[in-house]
Amino acid sequence: MHVVSDRQSPRATALEMAGRQREISVSEFFLKNRHLLGFDTPAKALVTAVKEAVDNALDACEEAGILPDISVQVSDRYGKSRVIVEDNGPGIVESQIARIFGKLLYGSKFHKLSQSRGQQGMGISAAGMYGQLTIGKPLHIISRIKGDKLASEMYVSIDTARNQPDIHKKKRLKWDRPHGTRVEMEMEGHYQKGAHSIEVYLKQTAIANPHLAIIYKDPHGEELRFARTTRKLPPRPVEIKPHPYGIELGRLIQMLSNSKSRTLLRFLEDEFSRVGKKTALNIIELARQHSDRKLSNRSYPKHIAHAQATALHKAIQKTRILAPRTDCIVPIGEKQLLDGLHKELEADFFTVTTRPAAAYRGNPFQVEVAIAYGRPGGAGVEVDESGHMRKKEAQETRASEHLIAQKDEPVHLLRFANRVPLLYQQASCAITKAVIQTNWRGYGLHQPKGALPIAPMAVLVHVASVWVPYTSESKEAIEPYPEILREIKLGLQECARKLAHYLHHEQQLHQEYDRRTYIEKYLPHIGVALQDILALSNNERDSTLKKLDDVLHESRTMQRPAP
Ligand SMILES: Nc1ncnc2c1ncn2[C@@H]1O[C@H](COP(=O)(O)OP(=O)(O)OP(=O)(O)O)[C@@H](O)[C@H]1O
């Protein structure tokens, strides 16, 4: 017999259960699930907070056509950190400040299909919420827009139950910047060096953003400066409409019912990219056949029933439509990427490639790949301008060189999405998968099965898109869609071919160097033997040996291959 213990709570009735149903605000949700936003440990939270503020500053400057000058200051005392990020961007109008910093899912980038670092509208407010939760202090913002005499200062936190901003203090004040924004946040944090540090994030940001100048003051008061290598801003990405191939049925139904267009023909032409009149007519004709002729050019979008919308969706997939336009994507560019790598890394060989734009689920994207191979101080042979070979001198390795792996380590990956370095969740990222799935042995590298290749090398991959499919809200890894994986692999193969060519040449140089040292070692002995056999004078012997040496040298002068 089953006896119910007195201590067990009584079972609930449906009515009681109904009484407990409550709406959950988005901020309450993320407060409980802060790991989803990248605030799981104090060390990661600190890097994430800096990243959110710097990415916003860069987006704002570029959108306003301003060359970004950003300063970052971090202090850290007994687990309590303070981050101050200041930019020379366009500033934020006062009426928007509270909602931008005190409300999750509020932003200017979510609804448009255009390449930007921010996407979701909750990065900076989430950092504020984390500070509020761990230290109990609101965000402190100063912002001034061009032409305004005074700046606006505000202390803002989030009322998490309502996902609404709470303004604690606000005033107008004098500020020495003519325009820009300063965000100050306090939080539980842990400052650390290494692969997941603020320095590495900033260094990689400088590589992918050669137009950026940034000054960073670390918790020890040391200043690190990244100068810009170009004064040219990246072109402003064009905003596009969705491509029909990427539209799912539910979204199409919603678009039809929200449409302001009065006919189906206009709806297709107005709301999608790459659909002109001819393509729209083709789609409608095909949809008519699938819908017992219940659709026409003049059908009123809001009145199209589910069955007809399904027919329309099928027709879209079957109609030939131009691939998505690609001027909405702004890659870093091969020259800029090479300049950035040269500036921030020391390596023996660099190569870079930009793939043509492609699309996943109707979203245009473009992949860039670069390889930096060989660490200074590593063994190697070099050929000087006159063609002489010599062993390379060991050099002092820069502190930053840990971006390139040691020769017996797996290669280091520098992953980027829309010019933002991705520092965490490497294993689940499309970039890592593509590197592992590439056969590096075919290009002369050692690669354990199912793993990254082992080489003194950094592999940089940048995925730029109007909508980056991140694996989670913390935007740390890219979803491995087959189209994205394919493009990354093709880029890797192009770079790997050039690397293989370089490695082959290096190997030849080594062999040549060894042979030459061997000959040089025995040449004096040959001289003595020749002198004996041919009864040469000392002068004749030396001039014969010199000629022999010159001939050997001539035949072994080698040219370095172009990268
Ligand atoms: N320094 C700044 N200068 C000007 N505008 C800013 C600045 N920081 C934030 N904003 C504005 O605030 C909005 C919200 O920023 P937030 O970081 O919360 O989200 P996001 O950047 O849009 O997306 P994500 O959550 O993916 O980072 C941005 O869309 C931008 O319009």
Image (cartoon, rainbow, N blue to C red):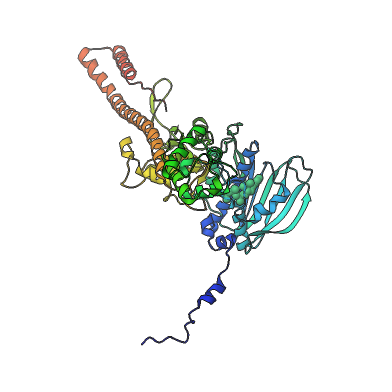
Number of numbered labels in the structure image: 0
Q: Is residue 220 visible?
A: no
Residue 75 versus residue 390 in the image, above or below: below
> Where is residue 292 shown, x and y percent of the image?
43, 45
From the top left corner, tell me how far across and down residue 505 is, in percent: 34, 28
Residue at the image position 47 percent from the left and 43 percent from the top: 246
Residue toward you, 46 or 112: 112
Residue visible at 56% across and 57% down in the picture? 190
Q: Nearer the viewer, residue 51 or 541?
A: 51
* Up-down relation of residue 526 to residue 136 (above or below): above
Q: Nearer the viewer, residue 199 or 477?
A: 477
Examine the rendered structure and indicate whether residue 536 appears above or below residue 323: above
Q: Can residue 65 be seen here?
A: yes
In x, y percent, where is residue 467?
51, 44
The image quarter in which residue 157 lies: bottom right
Screen quadrant of the C terminus: top left
Residue at 44% over, 86% down: 5
Residue 523, x across and y down, in percent: 28, 22
Q: Is residue 123 left or right of residue 398?
A: right
Name the one closer to the observer, 174 or 344. Answer: 174
Farthest-out residue, front: 293
Position of the N terminus, as image quadrant, is: bottom left
Image side of residue 551 versus residue 84, left or right? left
